[in-house]
Amino acid sequence: MGISRRGFIKASAVTGATVAGLSANKPMLTAFSETDKKEQIAESGKWLASTCQGCTTWCPVQVYVENGRAIKVRGNPNSKGNHGKICPRPHLAIQQLYDPDRVKVPMKRTNPKKGRNEDPKFVPISWEEAIDAVTDKMMELRKSHETHKFALFRGRYTGAADIFYKALPTIFGSPNNISHSAICAEAEKLGPYVTEAFWDYRDYDLEHTRYVIMWSTDPVSSNRQVPHAISMFGKVLDQAKVAVIDPRLSATASKADEWLPVIPGQDGALVSAIAHVILKEGIWNREFVGDFKDGENLFAKGSAVDEAAFEENKTYGIVKWWNLELKDRTPEWAAEISGVPAEQIYRVARDFAEAAPRAISWLAPGSAMQIRGGYTSMGAHALNALVGSIENIGGTNRGEKVPLESIPELDSYLDEIAKKGKKHEKIDQRGRIQFPAFAKGELHKGVVTNNVADGILNEDPYDIKMAIGYWNNFVFSCTGAQRWEKAMEKIPFYVHITVNPAEMTQYADIVLPACHQLFERWGVIKSKQNMNAYGSIQQPVIEPLWDCKVDETEIGWLIAESFAKKGFSNLYDYYRNEFTDPETGKKATNEKEFNLVATKFLSKKLWDPSEEKKGDQISSWQEFVDVGVWNAKRTPYKKHWEEGFETASTKFEFYSETLKGLLDEHAKGHNTSIDKVMEAMKYEARGDLAFVPHYEEPIRYGDEKEFPLIFTEHRSRLNREGRSANTTWYQEFKDADPGDEKWDDVIKINPIDCKKYGVKSGDRVKVTSVQGSIEVTVKEWEGTRPGVAVKCYGQGHWAYGRIATMDYQKKIARGGNNNEILPSDYEHLSGSTARHGGIARIKIEKI
Ligand SMILES: Nc1nc2c(c(=O)[nH]1)N[C@H]1C(S)=C(S)[C@@H](COP(=O)(O)OP(=O)(O)OC[C@H]3O[C@@H](n4cnc5c(=O)[nH]c(N)nc54)[C@H](O)[C@@H]3O)O[C@H]1N2
Ligand SMILES: Nc1nc2c(c(=O)[nH]1)N[C@H]1C(S)=C(S)[C@@H](COP(=O)(O)OP(=O)(O)OC[C@H]3O[C@@H](n4cnc5c(=O)[nH]c(N)nc54)[C@H](O)[C@@H]3O)O[C@H]1N2
Ligand code: SF4
Ligand SMILES: [Mo]
């Protein structure tokens, strides 16, 4: 591959000469690569830059393109974030691209009946006909002044998201742009936000760390800096200790120094006990936290401390935290609840503190996306503050700004219909007493994604008459998936913009084929890893394979153009007037040009020669396209130690005045007290306890007698979020997930429990919770703690294609979708869907 026949013969001849001693000082491979270099490249293809969005790491990559075909993917060597490395998943992206089951042309439904067991009877139509049908329906809503009854759903997105996701519903007149964020990981962002006013994922300084506590993360398989974690993991194991807190033996846990197989949902007990030990034993970081005024440690088990005795440095509320929560939270107490031995908790706490400040408490969704996970998110992050690793060497960091342009102001393009439409309550019911749903420090800014199904089903606050969804698959990806099936049946007109014929597609009236994000479109994205933030390009490295278009820009443009023809030109005017190619000064005249103009417009600050850059000095668009990535300066340490944090107190808040302020505002809006809000949100804490990290008992659906096992799950090493299942490599290498089997979907149960319930590996079983049943295969596996059953998320597709399903025609799933047994509930502060913490109890029955 990559070498023409002629080039290969020549190269071998030279290699032969090298072996014969002509160039004896050169290693053979180097000599080989130096031969005839130009001719080889000219004849065989080239590496073109793009970005992988197979998970939220968003890695700069290069694609090898030969004769118009994408052949392979590697990390972009110009990237300081992933230092030219990738994980295994972009290789599967090529199979996704060339998947014969892709949606290839626009289609319309001819069977008006909707349901899992109805054949939509799709027939191909032209883009003109498809867009015309979409805008006809939307114009009807404008005529009847019901624009709010339109919803736009999105899953994944690029830096161009707002061009479609925000501009379209806003100018059209709907409050209902519904993103997938709350089924993703918003509860994880909550902890860092309420403590240090940072609403984002952290970047962990793995290179310099000496201890890492991994709260429910398996960073060599998933999470958000995978290539960096994979390439750094050997070094981390050499120079640091690793403790993994996870009910299952993950890939990382199997190599770790400590595995703490916590009972699902009991993480909060471990947080409190670790903090208790650090304070009681006086091993906190003085530089960050401060000290007792007279130097004597007054944190003694069971006794409250006078706040005036302690002088804090960069933090706020340490004594309050002790008095309200920590003083009685001994490891012995936590051991009972969490199933983790007390001596292990002591050891982890001591070793973690001893490594300070080069110690990371790595917070991930597993311990946060739980019904009562908000306080674990807060507490697990606060442990970093106790050891002074916030923005410190070997600790938990943020990332420098990547100056992508925002979309221009929309206000002047809103007419009266739009302004009125926007004012309606949103279909996700955010803002109601149980959903303060704050994001980025603002109340009701967070989406309550999964509640949309209930909003639609109950027509509360109103009925949804039309929706467009793109790059999403909520019928599969949301817990309580059955509700989404019913909700989608109920929406009279639905449009799905998609690559594969997914579950969500089966309910569509119009299906629009999307370009694949990695290979077939222009775009720009920002992300960070390895203490380097970056902006990375996406380009059409090949001609789009089928009659597909780019969701965020091209399809937006076509809709806008069609609106204009029907007498409503505001969206078209916005796209036409506001987006100019910064290089040529030209405006787009068609959808293809708009995709490129918008990308250049948004990424301007990364490459325009007139912009001052705090990072790589790229000086033209072409150069940006060639190198593919703009690296910000390496993240500096301790920035907010000097500047102060943007919290209410300007300190790192163990006692969160920031959270208190938000809850207070929300309570006042409902003429009630914070305690009442806590109750509506299903939290137990009352009074001041609501503002410090604390233990809350997990909520589980299902009675223990009927449903003896606690169900828990993890994501797959090879899943590109929900988008790998129809590739043969995913199925063939499914056993890359510890305990899993190729081409199958297994429920992993400890041999002790297998004996107890009379099942063995290979048995087919029905797994039932209060939510529903699925059918899967049993796997006896010691990596699951007794009392718990573990299953990977990702199989169980009854649509998506011929590989993902057992039988696509007959809609027979391969395995079972976890979301059909996980009931829908929330971490209410953030509106997040609770998928972890063992929220469902299950029973298993042989079939
Ligand atoms: N039980 C359980 N549920 C989960 C999770 C879990 O771990 N367990 N994970 C959750 C998380 S973290 C997330 S982020 C969500 C993800 O869930 P969603 O946001 O709903 O997305 P996916 O399931 O990845 O589905 C992607 C859809 O986009 C289409 N598609 C694929 N590539 C492209 C493209 O390039 N462009 C466009 N326009 N479409 C494309 C696919 O055909 C598919 O229809 O799932 C959540 N659901
Ligand atoms: N390979 C791969 N990587 C991905 C993605 C992907 O689809 N595939 N998706 C990306 C996306 S969209 C996201 S949001 C991130 C998610 O980031 P991850 O860190 O992958 O988060 P989760 O999948 O939610 O975490 C699941 C882990 O939590 C454990 N767990 C379950 N319940 C509990 C519990 O009660 N307590 C504790 N301590 N642990 C528990 C599970 O065993 C599992 O190891 O990953 C990103 N990276
Ligand atoms: S799947 Fe994620 S970690 Fe892997 S290369 Fe793509 S973006 Fe990076
Ligand atoms: Mo996610």
Image: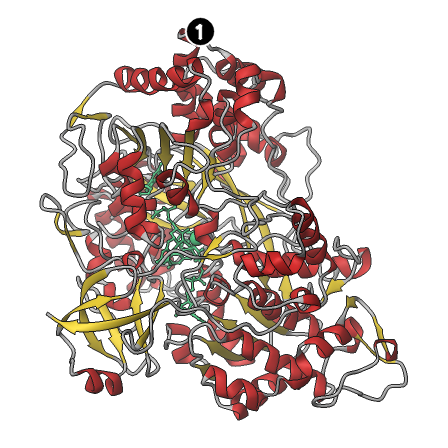
* Helix, strand or loop for disc 1: loop
Q: Decide: is 31 above or below 777.
A: above
* Residue 480 position (above or below residue 161): below
Q: Nearer the viewer, residue 23 or 741?
A: 741
Q: In the displayed image of the protein, which residue is found farthest to the front?
A: 671
Q: Residue at x 21, y 73 (%)?
A: 844
The image quadrant where one finds the C terminus is bottom left
Residue depicted at 47% across the width and 56% down the height:
826
Question: Is 345 situated left or right of 114 in this image?
Answer: right
Q: Residues within 10 Å of mark 1 (few under 14, many from 20)?
A: few
- Residue 179 position, x and y percent, is 46, 41
Q: 520 or 218, which is in the foreground?
A: 218
Question: Which residue does the image show at 13% across and 46% down from the upper left?
Answer: 808
Residue 183 percent coordinates (x, y): 43, 51
| Disc 1 residue: CB within 8 Å of ligand 1 | no
**Is 230 left, or right, of 719 in this rendering?**
right
| Figure check: 257 above or below 565 | below
Residue 188 is left or right of residue 227, and the answer is right
| Residue type marked 1 | Gly
Residue occupying the far right of the picture: 294
Residue 732 pos. (x, y %): 19, 61
Q: Nearer the viewer, residue 71 or 337?
A: 337
Residue 301 to residue 399: above or below: below
For disc 1, the marked residue is 567
Asked which quadrant contains residue 557, the reply is top left
